[in-house]
Amino acid sequence: MDVKALYERGLKLRRKMFGGKAVDERMNALGDFGEPLQNIVNAYAYGDVWSRPALPLKTKSLAMLGITAAMNRPQEFRVHVNGALNNGCTADEIREILLLVALARPLARFFTGADVIGRVVFNSPVKGTPEIVSYSIVVICFLQAGYAIRSGGMIWVDAVTQRLPRRIQAVCEIFGMLLGILFFGLVCWGSIEPASYSWTSNEFEGEGALRVPAWPARFIVVLGTFLAALNYALLAADRIRALARGTPPPHDPAPTIG
């Protein structure tokens, strides 16, 4: 696809997401001086990257909200809130993203910044920083897994199944959910013993004055994977009942990639 086609596709998508008036104002804000930049934004940001099929627009909008909130960019955040709503994001989904940012950003930035200052200024890193930052990532990932599954936030690839009859598609969905139950169930089962050992042995990570107990993160993995398997089981039960009755499923399982 040539640059002109990318530009036209990007401009069309940009107007759809943010509204024609808002896009025109941004494009004309700097006149001729800003025209080259706007050409790049339309052709490559929206005509290429935003138009790639691997992720749905809704997911990309949620990612941009998380990025702009974490970077403290209120102007860009306001712009992408409008785009997210036009791409089908709900207020509840936006709230969940902000809660994750609120949880992860202060903790991770504090310890990362303190670690950098300690290394550069005092030649003494903050003990336990890698462990705390990595544990915060564990908390974010595993505690949101169950909600992401139940709310349809997981991505389903349907490039093959969308060409099959609807009942076969339903069987494939159920099979995928059963695999999800198996996967998260095995992770949950395999995580119980390490979590128990971490509790009974008073396991810590890190050295020096700041040592981080390991058991909270390990039990969070157990809880998060259990909730993920449970939600897959509930969705599978809904699909099986709908298939047996010959009725449509309660709701689409997730955003799809065609």
Image (spheres, rainbow, N blue to C red):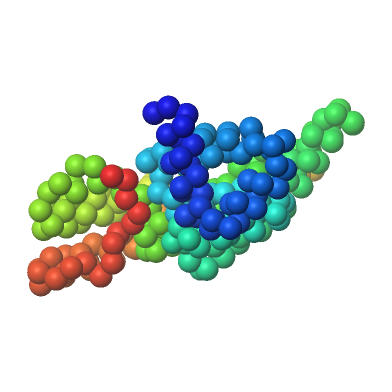
Quadrant including the C terminus: top left
Compared with 188, 147 (above or below) is: below
Farthest front residue in view = 32
Say which residue appears at 60% left-offset and 56% top-offset. Answer: 22
Rendered residue at 45%/57% (across/down): 87
Q: In which quarter of the image is the N terminus?
A: top left
Q: In this view, does 197 lie above or below 7?
A: below
Q: Residue at x 56, y 60 (%)?
A: 82
Nearest to the observer: residue 108 or residue 6: 6
Q: Could you say which is closer to the camera, residue 124 or residue 244?
A: 244
Q: Which of 232 and 170 is in front in this view?
A: 170
**Quadrant in the picture for residue 255:** bottom left
User: Disc count in the image?
Assistant: 0
Toward the right, the furthest residue is 121
Residue at the spot 44% in from the left edge and 50% down from the top edge:
57
Residue 79 horizontal side relative to residue 227, left or right: right
Q: Is residue 211 visible?
A: no
Q: Report whether 18 appears left or right of 132.
A: left
Q: Position of residue 107 (x, y in %)?
A: 71, 51
Is residue 44 something that shows in the picture?
A: yes
Counting from the top left corner in percent of width and height, residue 228 is at: 38, 58
Q: Where is residue 11 in the image (x, y as percent from the top left)?
A: 50, 44
- Left or right placement of residue 133 versus residue 189 in this view: right
